[in-house]
Structure formats: structure tokens, C-alpha cells
């Protein structure tokens, strides 16, 4: 099941580029934010600590947003 999910996410990221990355990162950040507020401190993610996961997803969100905005501001 996991490999199917990973392949689907990779396909969407390839098709929609930074928009897909931004969407998945923001969705993941929102989910972890809610879970952290509800008391979750450990994750099954490789990073384990939810604060690290939030920092990672936040960074990805910022980089994807910059990738979408910067080409239009550097003309």
C-alpha cells in the first residue's frame, strides 16, 4: 500500500510541480499541527519528534511557495 501511495504522490508532483508539493506539504503541516495540539509528541515519521516534522513540512511549504512566486518577481 505504501509504495502505491508514494508512486501516486510522485506522479502528482511530477504532473503539477510546485503546486502539488505546496499542497501536500501544507496539508501535512496542518494535520501535524492539529495532532500536536491534541497531544501527539511522537510520530511514525523518520524524524520522530512532531516539532521536527512541522519544521520540515514548513520548510518544504516555504520553498514550494518561493518556487511559484520568484519566477514572476524576477522579470
Image: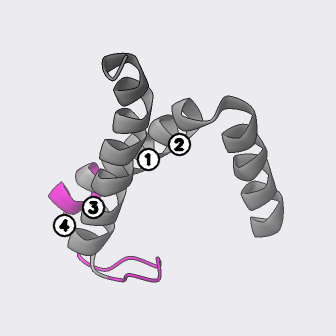
Q: CA distance from mark 2 to mark 1?
A: 6 Å
Residue hosting label 2: 21
**Residue 36 magenta-highlighted:** yes
Q: CA distance from mark 4 to mark 3?
A: 14 Å
Q: Please name the colour scheme applied to the rendered image.
A: one colour
Residue hosting label 1: 25
Q: Which residues are magenta?
A: 34-48
Mark before the other along the chain sequence, 1 or 3: 1
The circle drawn on residue 65 is none
Q: CA distance from mark 4 to mark 2?
A: 27 Å
Q: Is residue 31 in sight in this rendering?
A: no
Instruction: Tell us which disc is closer to us: 2 or 3.
Output: 2
The reply to whether discs 2 and 1 touch (Cβ–Cβ < 8 Å) is yes
Total marks shown come to: 4
Residue hosting label 3: 54
Coordinates of residue 34 in the picture (x, y in percent): 26, 49
Crowding around mark 1 (Cα neighbors within 10 Å: few <14, some 14 to 19, many 20+) is many
Crowding around mark 2 (Cα neighbors within 10 Å: few <14, some 14 to 19, many 20+) is many
Which of 57/62 is in front? 62
Coordinates of residue 54 in the picture (x, y in percent): 27, 61
Amino acid at each position: 500500500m505504501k509504495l502505491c501511495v508514494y508512486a501516486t504522490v510522485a506522479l502528482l508532483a511530477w504532473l503539477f510541480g510546485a503546486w502539488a508539493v505546496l499542497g501536500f506539504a501544507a496539508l501535512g503541516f496542518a494535520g501535524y499541527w492539529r495532532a500536536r495540539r491534541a497531544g501527539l509528541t511522537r510520530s511514525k515519521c523518520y524524524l520522530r519528534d512532531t516539532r521536527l516534522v512541522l519544521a520540515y513540512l514548513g520548510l518544504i511549504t516555504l520553498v514550494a511557495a518561493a518556487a511559484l512566486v520568484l519566477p514572476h518577481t524576477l522579470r
